């Protein structure tokens, strides 16, 4: 739904007003691993469809990862996941997408970072920028 209701210019303006820059964010889709996705598919086709198409805006700073669901609207606040609560931070890159996964307070969280489509046009460049900055984590 975020692909229908939002456009990249609106998202970029929101990020710029919050961050002051437009290089430390990604537009991502919720990613379910095979086991979790299959369980939701068996439980309900409708649940699987809505859950797998949720879109998020995530940005990174010294405090942690800030997440906001943008499936329906850009309004609302970001949720902070501090770096000290994040474990097993991994990035798996493929040709047209990447999977970013980590554990936050013991719960596995995963996002699909797409590199194709109008809404995802800056993801490749922003992902490279974030990797070079070590995700803006404080060492």
Image: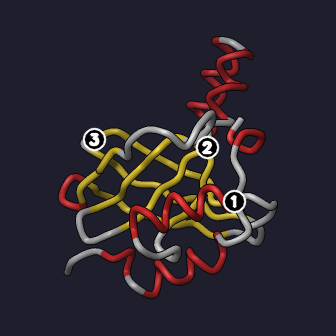
| Residue 41 point in image, percent of width and height | 69, 21
Q: Residues within 10 Å of mark 2 (few under 14, many from 20)?
A: many
Q: Position of residue 58 (x, y in %)?
A: 47, 56
Q: Which residue is mark 2?
A: 55
Q: Residue at x 24, y 61 (%)?
A: 83
- Crowding at dot 3, Cα within 10 Å, few <14 / some 14-19 / many 20+, comes out as few
Which numbered dot is residue 62?
none
Name the image quarter holding residue 34: top right
> Residue 135 appears in which quarter of the rendering?
bottom left
Task: Work out how far the residue at label 2 is from the one at label 3, CA to CA, in angstroms.
Answer: 22 Å
Residue 107 visible in rendering: yes
Q: Is residue 32 visible?
A: no
Q: Between disc 3 and disc 1, whose residue precedes?
A: 1
- Whichever of labels 2 and 1 marks the residue nearer the N terminus, that label is 1
State the CA–CA distance, disc 2 to disc 1.
13 Å
Question: CB under 8 Å between callouts 2 and 1?
Answer: no
Which quadrant of the structure image shows residue 90?
bottom left
User: Residue placed farthest to the top in the image?
Assistant: 43
Identify the element where label 2 is drawn.
strand
List the residue tagged with mark 3.
106
Foreground mark, 3 or 1, reads: 1
Q: Nearer the viewer, residue 47 or 12?
A: 12
| Extreme residue in the right direction | 117
Residue ID at (46%, 72%): 24
Above or below: residue 89 compared with residue 135: above
Pointer 1 local density, CA inside 10 Å: few below 14, some 14–19, many at least 20 = some
Alpha-carbon span between mark 3 and mark 1: 32 Å
Please tell me whether residue 126 is drawn above or below residue 97 in the rendered image.
below
């Amino acid at each position: 739904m975020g692909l229908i209701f939002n456009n990249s210019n609106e998202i970029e303006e929101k990020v710029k007003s919050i961050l002051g820059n437009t290089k430390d964010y990604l537009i991502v889709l919720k990613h379910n691993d095979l086991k979790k996705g299959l369980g939701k598919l068996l439980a309900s086709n409708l649940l699987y469809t809505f859950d797998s198409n949720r879109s998020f805006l995530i940005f990174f700073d010294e405090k942690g990862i800030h997440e906001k669901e943008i499936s329906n609207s850009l309004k609302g606040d970001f949720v902070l996941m501090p770096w000290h609560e994040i474990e097993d931070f991994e990035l798996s890159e493929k040709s047209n997408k990447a999977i970013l996964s980590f554990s936050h307070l013991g719960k596995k969280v995963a996002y699909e970072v797409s590199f194709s489509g109008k809404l995802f046009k800056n993801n490749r460049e922003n992902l490279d920028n974030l990797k070079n900055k070590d995700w803006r984590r404080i060492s």
